[in-house]
Amino acid sequence: MATCRYAPIVPSPDPAPLRLSVDRSSPVPLYFQLAQQLESAIETGGLAPGSLLGNEIELAGRLGLSRPTVRQAIQSLVDKGLMVRRRGVGTQVVHSQVKRPLELSSLYDDLLAAGQRPATRVLRNSVAPASAQAAAALGVPEGSEVVVVERLRLAHGEPMAHLTNHLPPDLLPLSTADLEATGLYRLMRGAGITLHSAQQTVGARAATAEEGRLLAEPEGAPLLTMQRTTYDAKGRAVEFGSHIYRASRYAFEFRLLVRT
Amino acid sequence: MATCRYAPIVPSPDPAPLRLSVDRSSPVPLYFQLAQQLESAIETGGLAPGSLLGNEIELAGRLGLSRPTVRQAIQSLVDKGLMVRRRGVGTQVVHSQVKRPLELSSLYDDLLAAGQRPATRVLRNSVAPASAQAAAALGVPEGSEVVVVERLRLAHGEPMAHLTNHLPPDLLPLSTADLEATGLYRLMRGAGITLHSAQQTVGARAATAEEGRLLAEPEGAPLLTMQRTTYDAKGRAVEFGSHIYRASRYAFEFRLLVRT
DNA sequence: GTCAATAGTTTGTCCGGACATACGGACTTC
DNA sequence: GAAGTCCGTATGTCCGGACAAACTATTGAC
C-alpha cells in the first residue's frame, strides 16, 4: 500500500556550517548578539527550516560562551516562535511561511511599510469632556477634560479610515502639523512614552450616511471597526481609539502564538 | 502652583505580607510554582497594582531559592505583561484592567466560556480537491485531496457563524458526531497535535443572499470575516479556515504585547 | 537655592557546574 | 516479526557567585 507518511524525517543535511561569533568588547549583550545572528541566519536561509541546531553545550564551547548564555539566546527565539526545543532531541528551526509577527504599530507606519504613500487630514484636535466610553477606557472621571483627535487617513489620495483618539490631558502636546506629518504612536514614543500593551476589539457594522460621506462609500457599506486602548509600561492607559476602516480596502493581519 | 504630577510615587504601603512557599517534593518546577503563586496573588489583589515586589535577592533568601530561579519566575510574568522590571528601581505589578490575553482558542470554547450554550450543525464533512487558496495555505498541490468541513455554529439556538475548514488528509479522523459535540481544536489536541501558532486575517464584507439565509441576516448585512492558517510545533500547516461571523453578534477581542 | 558629584540599591548579564527528565534508537526477548 | 527494555543524548531545572549598568536619593559645592 505504501501510504505516504506526512513529512517523515528531515535528515538535516547541514550539520553546522554557519559562522557565528561574538564580540565581547561590544556593549551589546552576548546572548543578544547570538540571537540576532541566529535570527538573520534563519531569515537568509543559512539555517534551513526543520534543521537541527547543534546541541547547546557544544555550541557554547565553540563560541566560548557558557550554556546559560546560549540558552538565553535560543530562548528568545523560541519565544518569538522561530524555533522549537524538544528534550532529548534538540532545537530545530520552525519552517513557517510567516513573515513577521505584527507589532503594536500605527496604521500610518503600516501603510508606509506597504509603500502606500499615506496622508492624514486632521478633522479635529481639541479638548473636550470625556464620553462615558472614553472615560472608562482611560480611567478618568466621566466628563473630565481629555484631548480628542479626529483624523482621516488617506492612501494615494483615497480615504482609508476614520480615526478618533482620546488621550489624557497633559500627556503630550499634539500639534496639528505633527499629526499630519506622522503617526500618533511615533509622536508618543518620541515624547518618551513607552508603549507596552493594547487591548483591541475588532468588529464590523454598516456605514451610516455621515460615515459613508467621509470614506467615499455608500450608506450601509460594510465597515471594519476597531477599538483600542493602549497602555504604557506602568499600566496607565495612554490612549483610547475608536476607528472605522473601509472593509473594501483594509483587513487586519496578525499572528497568534500559543502560550506553553 | 502645585501642578499635580501624574502618578508621582507609589509609597508601596505593603512591604511583603503575602505568603509564598514552594514544595520541593512536587514535580512541578520551583520557578513555576512561584510564578503561579505570584500570578494568583495579582489576580486576587494580594499584590496591589503598582506595588513593588521585594528585591530578588531578599525574595530568594526568604523562599530558600536561588536568584536565577526567582528571576525565571518573575520573567515569565513579565513576558505575560503582568509585571515590569526597572533596573535600580525594582519589579512592580502593572495595573491593567485587562483580564487575560486571548489564546489560540476555538469559537466553541469561547462561547462555552461565555456561558452561551454553543451547538454545532455539520453541513459538510468530506474529501474534496483543494482550492487554490486552501492548497497554498496548507502547502499541498492544488487539486490534491483535502478534508473539507463546513459547520454552522449556534448559540442559544441562533446562528452565530459559518465555518469552513480545510485539513490535510490523514491528519486525524473526523467524525461528524465528534464535530457536533466539541470544537475542532479540541479534537486536534486530543489527537496529539500540538498547536503552535496561527496567521489570521480579519476583514469585513456584505453578506450574499446565500450567506444571509444561513445566518438569518438580510442580504447585504455586514459580516466579519476571518481566515486563519494554524501551524503545529514543527511548522506544518494543520488547518486552514475561512469563516464568517454575524457582525451584530460577534467581535474579536485580543491583546497585543509590545516586544521589547 | 540650584546644580553636579556621589553613594547605595536593584536589576541585567554572565559564568561553571550539577542532577533530573524526556526522547529515540538499538538491543533483547517472546 | 513484534513487543518491551536499556542506554546515550539533549534539553529542563537549579544552584551560587561575580561584576556591570541604571536609577534614586543624598550630599556637597557654587
Image: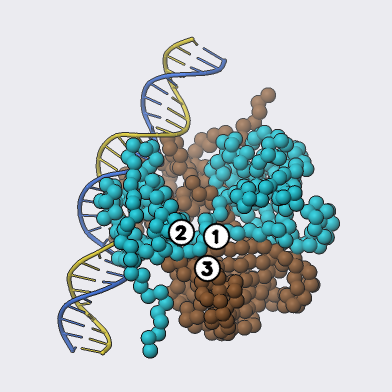
Chain colours: A brown, B cyan, C yellow, D blue
Residue shown at 71% from the left, 50% from the top: B155
Measure how far apart labels 3 and 2 are at the Cα level.
13 Å
Disc 2 packing (10 Å; few <14; some 14–19; many ≥20): many
Amino acid at pointer 2: Gly
Residue shown at 50% from the left, 63% from the top: B97
Disc 1 chain ID: B
Whether the residues at callouts 2 and 1 have beta carbons within 8 Å, the answer is yes
Amino acid at pointer 3: Thr
Q: Which mark is residue A230?
A: 3
Q: Find disc 2 in the rendering and name its residue.
A: B81
| Callout 1: SS | strand
Ranked by sequence position, the earlier of labels 2 and 1 is 2
| Callout 2: SS | loop
Whether the residues at callouts 3 and 1 have beta carbons within 8 Å, the answer is no
Residue B189, above or below D21:
above
Q: Is residue A232 left or right of residue B248?
A: left
* Quadrant including the N terminus of chain A: top right
Residue B80, above or below A107:
above
Disc 2 chain ID: B
Measure how far apart labels 2 and 1 are at the Cα level.
10 Å
Q: Position of residue A232 (x, y in %)?
A: 46, 68
Residue B82, above or below B153:
below
Measure how far apart labels 3 and 1 are at the Cα level.
10 Å
The answer to whether dots 3 and 2 both sit on one chain is no
Q: Which mark is residue B109?
A: none
Amino acid at pointer 1: Arg
Q: Find disc 1 in the rendering and name its residue.
A: B255
Residue shown at 43% from the left, 74% from the top: A192
Q: Position of residue B27 (x, y in %)?
A: 38, 37
